[in-house]
Amino acid sequence: MLVTGFPAQAFDTNCYVVAPGPGEQCVVVDPGVGVLDQLDEVLAQHRLHPAAVLLTHGHFDHTFSVAPVCGAKGITAYVHPADTELLADPAKGLGVSLDELFGGRLTYSEPDDVAELTDGATLSLAGLEITVDHAPGHTGGSVLFRLPGAGSQWEAEQLCLSGDVLFAGSIGRTDLPGGNTQTMLTSLREKILPLADDTVVLPGHGPETTIGRERSANPYLRDLTGAPSRGL
């Protein structure tokens, strides 16, 4: 399996590309600001063909390039329905408009083809089986994407693309519109802590980590009660 990622030009948002292997179809996860050139280089280097764009949530630093990627490739963007409105109007998740934030230097467009993600669903895309976990708190529609890690560079039981739910040493902020601290703690307790310790976490910002590392060292998880480890 091929898993690669790189930071966007703004906010260091991680954009990931996941495929069964070189020369195959792939999914693109969270194409943020200014990723198009580097994404094209990754696709060309590994001879990959995008089959879908998956969005961990609707904040524009994760979705800014979704329309041009989907439009150029003729593919669908997947997002949880609670965050669909953020694709139409990113300002709803910020409290300010993009013009106020960037002085009119960025032009955003909404993707034409959008499909809804459902908690507990398994997506069969690009030869991959991807499980969706709804984990609200950072936004109402935040999700985790889990898939088997065997054959990846980590050879872990599973991988978890955590968006802005969980980071190395931290968690996603809850003070933006749509955020909720208590809901975030519930998501961490019910969706993060049950994962096996060797689960490799690929977050929306910052370096990779593991559930075991975060369970023992992340201050936001220490006081939460865990549950038995859950596989795929």
Image (tube, grey):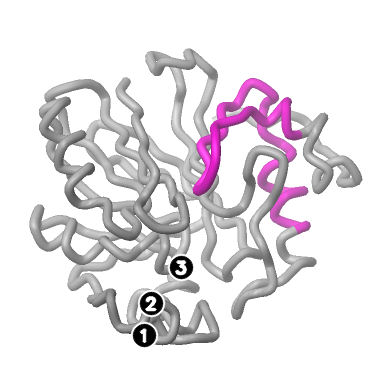
Residue 59 badge: 3
Q: CA distance from mark 1 to mark 3?
A: 15 Å
Reading the chain from its start, which is encountered first: label 1 or label 3?
A: 3
Mark 3–mark 2 contact, CB under 8 Å? no
Give the residue pinned by disc 2. Answer: 102
Q: CA distance from mark 3 to mark 2?
A: 15 Å
The three-letter code of the residue at mark 2 reads Phe
Badge 3 crowding class, 10 Å Cα cut-off, few under 14, some 14 to 19, many 20 or more, is many
- Image quadrant holding the N terminus, namely top left
Instruction: Residue 173 in the image: state x and y as whole percent.
Output: 67, 63
Residue 99 badge: 1
The answer to which quarter of the image holds residue 10 is bottom left
Foreground mark, 1 or 3?
Answer: 1
In screen coordinates, is 58 left or right of 18? Answer: right
The span shown in magenta is 185-214
Which residue: 46% across, 42% down?
Answer: 131
In screen coordinates, is 8 left or right of 167? Answer: left
Judging depth in this view, the residue of 41 and 74 nearest the camera is 41
Question: From what the image shows, is residue 135 above or below residue 154?
Answer: below
Instruction: Residue 30 in the image: state x and y as whole percent.
Output: 37, 53
Residue 3 badge: none
The three-letter code of the residue at mark 3 reads His
Question: From what the image shows, is residue 152 above or below residue 188?
Answer: above
- Image quadrant holding the C terminus, namely top right
Mark 1–mark 2 contact, CB under 8 Å? yes
Residue at disc 3, secondary structure? loop
Foreground mark, 3 or 2?
Answer: 2
Question: From what the image shows, is residue 94 above or below residue 219?
Answer: below
In screen coordinates, is 24 left or right of 33? Answer: left
Which residue: 67% across, 26% down?
Answer: 196
68 falls in the magenta region: no
